[in-house]
């Protein structure tokens, strides 16, 4: 499996490829790349480390070759290629690693070292050391920077002379848990979410610490080592908004310059709105209300024109320059796909129901197994929370079936956001937002589409939680004020679903749960480890996007609190949802079965049978899931021939232990964690990790702008309760239904901030790497994994072709719907930009 070198010469020639640092000056109109910091080759010293022979007096460490330096620079694009010659004695043997010391004043990005030596497989073109790491001046490091040959070895298989270096590198990555972390540090460590609040600003900005308690359990985040606040020693201090990009994450986890350029250009739309209070009171612009749907459509045309005096009133030069460079197209947005073909089809009941199967949150609909729906809330605290939906509300809409017959035939479904929000209703409705807890019932029709049956909107009982709740039930209406009321009832459900999507389905279940796995992998699995090579591509940019989210999105007063209805309770609610998080249930088949939308079927190719055959997310997802699982099984069996090998793999066992006990420490005593004793447990666990990081995240992230960029379709806030007959709000709804609807949902400024944020989140960067791809074809020297990955890539291509064929088949009505928008979110590949398709390898945005 390993490639052996046949060294016959004392001199070995090689090539080093690096990228020089460029100074990135953040100018609002663009990111200007200024001077390149020159790298002098004679100030970059390299030494090879033998994998065969030991250093004299240090028998457990590989022999060091003579120091040498870079020479003969040539440039190809932004890369610099240097020649290097190593002068070795005859006793050196095969190299297995090298040390590099940078004596230049600036860092550079080291891509790879290739040695011109003969190996068993000539197609490899020499011996490869894939580095992909920033190398800072040597004075910044306490230990030498070391890079290893591109070979996968289990700990027990590692050449004896490299083991010390392998273990030492992991110790360096773990750090010592104390001290300030600088940008050149490479330390992966854990912390609680104690940096969301800003208590020094006052009590309004205090937020609970998430993680480390039974009241607020949470996955861990990366340690940044900022000092505590003066007000609360348990809270970590925050960076100013404009310094957000300086937040610590290990340097190699940060966005590459190309992605940073793409990101900042769009992000400035959000930053401008957060920093310019003047936008709320511009002379000829009402940034409080949209008066009609036509008003909203204008922002996708010419944008918002700003009076000249706004520039003079803007608070910073950066803001002035951005607005000035935008000219008359300030805050212009791309047309969301949901209204491209038809400007009003989003309002239909059919489309509203279809998006539960093929929209941006297709992971919440459940089979209804009992009527009326019940609650899991503690009756001692919340009283009787059994639904008030009656037979009379829905019986005549079931195509002649009784409710019991429909349940038995698996034709009744529910979108149930009642229990999630009821415990928070009183607090939330005391803020500027007004919401209901909702239950939505649906009926599966013969043509495969879902029919809306009724919506229950509930509030806590006015006499106290122990008395249960009060509610109103609404059923579909087509005419007059009743139709406008029905449209509002759907809006309240959409608001709830938007909150669940953004807070739980998206942030908690992908971003937050993956980050501690990223940290544990880097701390416990060597780059030599086969599982590191399997999983590492699925962690790209995750720590950085999460750190930026804590800075501007999730924090007290941040974008999420401004644009999503739970406001200050948003992150606290995700902690409550984490109490129900179970790792094995993140597997797609397990999730579908748990939600009652599928059943086990041993005779089926995928082992389960969908109860809604035309369920685009589940159908396409099962194809992708199956392909990932096959790839992972094939890969793992290359390196683990027996279960005993898994049990004796010290790094693997340490990784799995730390992932549970530290990364997800508040869940460490749960009995459902796989024991990591068998090949099946390994492959199942790695499949789940890759599924979450790639396909699950893609399915719930990259449709945000296509579906939610038009806020009336996916409102994220409601500002008042359902109007009562005789009230001024009811009269407004009668005389001007559009204005009545828009005055209830997200106001204009929050709409603009919200769609700017989801435009960022829905955009693929120019350097995206997709499922089935790697950043280098030489990611391993082993043939079998390379061939297995190639087969995986071909399978994904076949799946995409299959999805396209289904999208064009009119039999599958839920794939296109009234809005005439095909379901493309699980196409494996995409072009850069706002495409509504493509599965990146990682939670990278």
Image (spheres, rainbow, N blue to C red):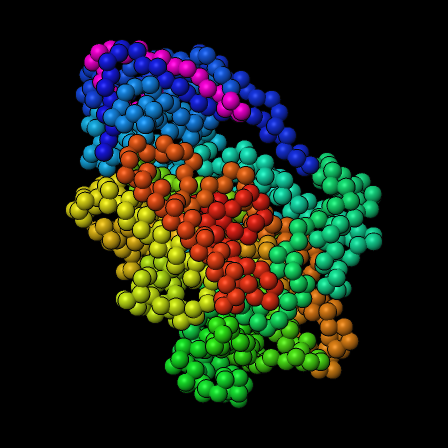
Residue nearest the viewer, comparing 130 with 813: 813
Residue at coordinates 38% horizontally, 20% vertically from top-left? 100
* Residue 21 higher or lower than 753, as above or below: above
In the depicted structure, whether residue 71 falls above or below residue 363:
above
756 drawn magenta: no
> In the rendered structure, does residue 97 fall within the stretch colored magenta?
yes
Quarter placement of the N terminus:
top left
Viewer-proximal residue, 789 or 196? Answer: 789
> Percent x, y for residue 608?
33, 66
Horizontal side, residue 254 vs residue 591: left or right: right
Q: Residue 4 at what x, y percent from top left?
A: 23, 25
Name the spot of residue 563 as percent of width and height, x first: 62, 57
**Which residue is pictured at 58% across the width and 41% down the height?**
263
Q: Nearer the viewer, residue 520 or 441?
A: 441
In the image, the segment drawn in magenta is 76-99
Residue 494 as seen in the image, left or right of residue 630: right
Whether residue 511 is visible, yes or no, is no
* Residue drawn at point x = 30 percent, y = 54 percent: 684
- Residue at x 59% of width, y 81% of height: 475
Front-most of 88 and 408?
Answer: 408
């Amino acid at each position: 499996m390993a490639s052996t070198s046949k060294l016959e010469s004392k001199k070995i020639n090689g090539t080093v490829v690096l990228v020089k640092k460029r100074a990135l000056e953040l100018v609002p109109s663009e990111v200007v790349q200024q001077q390149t910091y020159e790298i002098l080759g004679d100030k970059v010293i390299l030494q090879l480390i033998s994998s065969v022979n030991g250093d004299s007096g240090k028998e457990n460490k590989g022999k060091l070759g003579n120091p040498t330096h870079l020479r003969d620079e040539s440039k190809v694009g932004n890369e610099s290629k240097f020649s290097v010659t190593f002068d070795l004695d005859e006793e050196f043997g095969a190299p297995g690693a090298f040390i590099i010391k940078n004596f230049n004043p600036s860092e550079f990005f080291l891509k790879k070292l290739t040695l011109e030596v003969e190996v068993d497989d000539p197609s490899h073109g020499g011996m490869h050391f894939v580095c992909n790491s920033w190398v800072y001046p040597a004075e910044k490091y306490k230990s030498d920077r070391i890079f290893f040959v591109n070979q996968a070895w289990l700990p027990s298989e590692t050449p004896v002379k490299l083991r010390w270096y392998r273990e030492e590198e992991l110790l360096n990555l773990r750090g010592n848990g104390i001290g300030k972390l600088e940008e050149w540090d490479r330390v992966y460590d854990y912390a609680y979410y104690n940096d969301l609040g800003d208590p020094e600003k006052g009590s309004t900005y205090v937020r609970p610490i998430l993680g480390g308690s039974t009241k607020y359990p949470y996955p861990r985040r990366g340690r940044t080592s900022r000092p505590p606040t003066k007000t609360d020693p348990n809270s970590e201090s925050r960076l100013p908004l404009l310094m957000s990009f300086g937040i610590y994450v290990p340097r190699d986890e940060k966005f590459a310059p190309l992605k940073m350029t793409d990101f900042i250009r769009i992000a400035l739309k959000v930053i401008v709105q957060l920093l310019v209070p003047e936008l709320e009171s511009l002379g000829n612009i009402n940034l409080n209300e949209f008066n009609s749907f036509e008003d909203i459509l204008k922002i996708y045309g010419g944008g918002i024109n700003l009076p000249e005096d706004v520039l003079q009133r803007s608070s910073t030069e950066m803001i002035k320059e951005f607005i000035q460079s935008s000219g008359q197209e300030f805050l212009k947005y791309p047309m969301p796909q949901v209204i491209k073909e038809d400007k009003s089809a989003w309002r239909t009941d059919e489309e509203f129901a279809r998006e539960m199967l093929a929209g941006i949150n297709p992971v919440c609909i459940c089979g209804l197994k009992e009527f009326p729906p019940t609650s899991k809330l503690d009756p001692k605290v919340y009283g009787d929370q059994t639904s008030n939906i009656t037979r009379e509300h829905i019986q005549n809409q079931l195509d002649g079936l009784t409710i019991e017959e429909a349940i038995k035939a698996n034709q009744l479904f529910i979108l149930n956001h009642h229990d999630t929000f009821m415990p928070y209703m009183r607090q939330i409705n005391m803020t500027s937002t007004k919401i209901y807890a909702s239950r939505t019932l649906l009926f599966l029709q013969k043509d495969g589409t879902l029919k809306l049956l009724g919506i229950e909107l509930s509030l806590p009982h006015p006499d106290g939680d122990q008395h249960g709740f009060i509610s109103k039930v609404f059923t579909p209406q087509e005419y007059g004020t009743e139709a406008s009321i029905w449209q509002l009832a759907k809006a309240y459900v959409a608001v709830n679903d938007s909150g669940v999507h953004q807070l739980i389905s998206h942030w908690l279940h992908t971003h937050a749960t993956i980050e501690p796995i990223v940290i544990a992998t880097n701390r416990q699995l060597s780059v030599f480890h086969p599982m590191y090579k399997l999983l590492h591509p699925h962690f790209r940019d995750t720590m950085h996007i999460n750190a930026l989210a804590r800075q501007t999105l999730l924090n007290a007063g941040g974008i999420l609190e401004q644009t999503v209805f739970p406001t200050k309770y948003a992150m606290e609610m995700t902690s409550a949802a984490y109490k129900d998080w179970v790792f094995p249930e993140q597997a797609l088949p397990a999730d579908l079965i748990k939600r009652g939308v599928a059943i086990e079927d041993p005779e089926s190719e995928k082992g389960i049978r969908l109860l809604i055959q035309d369920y685009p997310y589940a159908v396409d997802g099962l194809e992708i899931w199956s392909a990932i699982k096959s790839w992972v099984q094939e890969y793992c069996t290359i390196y683990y021939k027996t279960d005993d090998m898994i049990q004796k793999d010290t790094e693997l066992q340490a990784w799995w232990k730390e992932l549970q006990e530290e990364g997800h420490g508040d869940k460490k005593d749960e009995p459902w964690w796989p024991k990591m004793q068998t090949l099946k447990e390994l492959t199942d666990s790695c499949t789940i990790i890759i599924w979450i990081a790639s396909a699950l995240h893609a399915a719930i992230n990259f449709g945000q702008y296509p579906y939610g960029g038009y806020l009336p379709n996916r409102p994220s806030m409601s500002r008042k309760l359902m109007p009562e007959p005789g009230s001024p709000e009811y009269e407004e709804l009668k005389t001007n239904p559009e204005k009545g609807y828009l005055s209830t949902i997200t106001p204009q400024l929050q709409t603009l901030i919200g769609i700017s944020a989801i435009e960022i989140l829905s955009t693929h960067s120019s350097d995206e790497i997709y499922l089935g791809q790697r950043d280098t074809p030489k990611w391993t020297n082993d043939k079998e994994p390379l061939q297995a990955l190639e087969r995986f890539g071909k399978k994904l291509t076949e799946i995409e072709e299959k999805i396209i064929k289904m999208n064009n088949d009119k039999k599958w009505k839920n794939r296109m719907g009234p809005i005439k928008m095909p379901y493309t979110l699980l196409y494996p590949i995409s072009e850069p930009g706002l495409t509504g398709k493509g599965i990146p390898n990682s939670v990278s945005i």
